[in-house]
Image (cartoon, grey):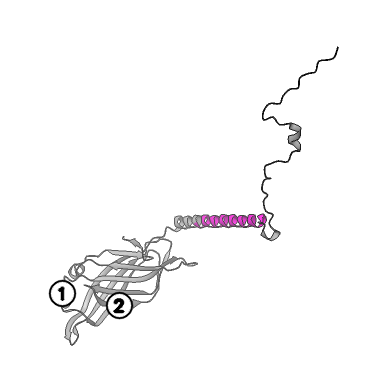
């Protein structure tokens, strides 16, 4: 009796033979490859790391230097305890004050004797002063200047600097001339005294630089100063640090 033929199974829709799929060419394009740069255009990782290391070492060195300077400054301050000198306008007296009328208008001729007291409050430091210049001003009128040579002030020392400040044929306005005449006659004239110098500290073995210092004493009338009043003096260091003792 003949064998009965087995029915052939039908493949489902969308079926793909795995064997054919392995050998069939892929329809997807291959992934793009990165372009190979020539040797001259390739980044040099070694040089970049060396530059980064150099920057790190430089930063650490600067940081260490700042720490050393800060520690040295603290030790210097704790050991010496430096203090600024104290300025006082001891006296201001005019030996001449005359206003005359000329072809160009009123002119002022004056001469004043100024005494400035300077005290060094430091117990362990000397104070070195640069060339000192004193100038007088009142009501916007320049009353002259007078210089003084540099000098060194010992520890805990008080020095009185004397200046003779002349002004010759200083042109002033008519209204200002009337105010100056009346103010000088009644001793109500307010004169500002300005001292410009350089101040540094030191010992017998070393000394610091002498930065510029401006001292302004004023705000009082001639009558008050002649009566013994001491005007307040404001010290300005580096043109922006104000110190009022």
Q: Is residue 27 above or below residue 191?
A: above
Disc 1 or 2, which lies upstream in sequence?
A: 2
Residue 137 position, x and y percent, is: 25, 73
Residue 84 located within the stretch drawn in magenta: no
In the picture as drawn, the residue positioned furthest to the right comes out as 1
* Label 1 – label 2 distance at C-alpha: 22 Å
Residue 73 position, x and y percent, is: 47, 57
- In the rendered image, the quadrant that contains the N terminus is top right
Between residue 41 and residue 167, name the one nearer to us: 41
Does residue 172 appear left or right of residue 135 in this picture? left
Residue indicated by mark 2: 145
In the picture as drawn, the residue positioned furthest to the front comes out as 1
State the image quarter where residue 180 is shown.
bottom left
Q: Report the span colored magenta.
A: 44-69
In the picture as drawn, the residue positioned furthest to the bottom comes out as 103
Residue indicated by mark 1: 179
Dot 1 falls on a residue whose secondary structure is: helix
């Amino acid at each position: 009796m003949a064998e009965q033929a087995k029915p052939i199974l039908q493949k489902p829709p969308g079926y793909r033979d795995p064997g054919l799929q392995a050998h069939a060419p892929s329809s997807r394009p291959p992934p793009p490859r990165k372009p190979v740069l020539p040797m001259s255009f390739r980044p040099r990782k070694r040089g970049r790391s060396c530059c980064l290391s150099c920057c790190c070492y430089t930063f650490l060195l600067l940081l260490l230097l700042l720490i050393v300077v800060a520690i040295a400054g603290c030790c210097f301050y704790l050991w010496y305890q430096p203090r600024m000198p104290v300025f006082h306008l001891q006296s201001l007296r005019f030996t001449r004050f005359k206003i005359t009328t000329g072809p160009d208008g009123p002119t002022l001729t004056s001469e004043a004797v100024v005494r400035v007291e300077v005290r060094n409050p430091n117990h362990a430091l000397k104070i070195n002063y640069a060339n000192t210049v004193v100038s007088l001003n009142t009501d916007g009128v320049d009353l002259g200047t007078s210089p003084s040579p540099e000098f060194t002030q010992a520890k805990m020392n008080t020095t009185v600097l004397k200046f003779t400040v002349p002004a010759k044929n200083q042109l002033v306005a008519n209204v200002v001339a009337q105010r100056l005449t009346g103010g000088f006659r009644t001793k109500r004239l307010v004169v500002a005294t300005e001292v410009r110098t350089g101040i540094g500290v030191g010992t017998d073995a070393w000394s610091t630089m002498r930065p510029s210092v401006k001292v302004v004493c004023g705000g009082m009338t001639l009558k008050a100063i002649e009566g013994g009043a001491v005007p307040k003096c404001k010290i300005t260091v580096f043109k922006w640090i104000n110190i009022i003792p």
